[in-house]
Image (cartoon, rainbow, N blue to C red):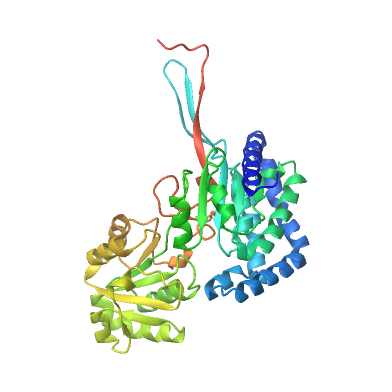
Amino acid sequence: MNSLKEKTLLMGRQAQSAVRVLATLSGEMRQNAIAAMPAKLLAVKNELSKANAVDVEEARTNGLEGPKIKRLQITDKVFDYMLNRLEEVAQLPDPLNRVLEGHTRPNGLRVEKISVPLGVIGIIYESRPNVTPDAASVCLKSGNAVILRGGSESLRTNVVLADAMISALQENGVPQHAVQIIRVPGHEAVDELLKLDQYINVLIPRGGKGLIRRIAEGTRIPVIKHYEGICHLYLAEDAPDEMAVALSVNSKCQRVEVCNALENLLVDLKSAERLLPKLKQAFDNNGVELRGCERTRLYLPGIEQAVEEDWSTEYLAPILSVKIVDGLNEAVDFINTYGSGHTDGIVTRSLERANRFVNAVDSASVLVNASTRLSGGGDYGMGAVVGISTDKLHARGPVGPNDLTSYKWVVYGDGHLRQ
């Protein structure tokens, strides 16, 4: 069995077999396997650092873009983050076998709706090796088997991570094929994965819009996805100066290369004269280029003119578009027109205004007086997540263990017959 097609088919069959075994294991067994993973990663930290250094150097030689190089690197901070996420996921409540709803009929028939795993999950991602332990732990926590396909640029790093976690499975009575990783580079492996609709229940792509669109359009398998993160922050007429500046800067500058970074800043006309000079100074201090509408440039004449394309561009870079709007309704219309449904926020002291914004903005995450960078599993108390969804079916927003479950109906009778 040497062909890539045959190897991929085998992975699908092995994952499906693992799911059947996982269904019989207790939540405690799955928890113990995840809890053992941090020690396994610590044991291979030197090997991991060497593999990552080779991946990074090769990626630079091949001309990989700066933001992707940054995502590829495993610094001590990133390594500690991975360990912490594993520990958090291990301690989360078991998402399986929960009674989502239930009742007893007048005739004594007991009907329950119970949470169950989705099955086999395929995760395809670029550059970010921290996705490997996140995805493995979240899928295992929810009783799913996972087939991982990281980017070719991070193959060495991902294999070290995956092998360490697989050893934790084996030592804790969990099927080793509950976590598998494709170990060959190239697009052909992805093409074969997309054909496994008889084994894979859902695909989750993480990466650039081109990758995600290719996955969504190239398979019959359901896909949980978001194409891009064009995130907005609306500074209302009563937005406090210090808070408005701090949230705007954090939303944009904390990490410019990620999907919940701010791309469009909306400033109410009634607060523009007060806020714009302070915002300009703060963004200058952080090396951010501002592009503004005509009215914004009346207050900040030195900035670039924003064009139509800017409002719908996910920069993933130190560039920010700024627009003055006439009140909350125009802000909401702008967001619902140009946004990607990922994350949008408002800064205001008015609860009534905040509630109007929350109800009107059609996005997966809507924040009030908080940085857009908070939209994600960790800051929502979900532990690790396997991605962000801007769809409305099956999951929406950060996709954690609870979101990787479905349900089945379980009915208890005592010889009940249909009349």
Q: Residue placed at 68% from the left, 68% from the top?
A: 52
Q: Position of residue 14 (x, y in %)?
A: 66, 40
Q: Which residue, as the protein is rendered here, is positioned at the far bottom?
A: 302
Q: Residue placed at 23% from the left, 76% from the top?
A: 270
Q: Residue placed at 73% from the left, 55% from the top?
A: 164
Vertical placement of residue 393 versus 390, above or below: above
* Foreground residue among 259 and 124: 124
Q: Quadrant of the N terminus?
A: top right
Q: Is residue 290 left or right of residue 65?
A: left
Q: Quadrant of the C terminus?
A: top left
Q: Is residue 312 left or right of residue 228?
A: left
Asked whether the viewer can see residue 367, the reply is no
Q: Position of residue 31 (x, y in %)?
A: 67, 46
Q: Position of residue 69 (x, y in %)?
A: 58, 72
Asked whether the viewer can see residue 75, the reply is yes
* Foreground residue among 402 and 17: 17
Q: Is residue 168 left or right of residue 392?
A: right
Vertical placement of residue 74 versus 222, above or below: below
Q: Position of residue 369 (x, y in %)?
A: 39, 67
- The answer to which quarter of the image holds residue 294 is bottom left
Q: How many marks?
A: 0
Q: Residue placed at 72% from the left, 46% from the top?
A: 169
- The answer to which quarter of the image holds residue 155 is bottom right
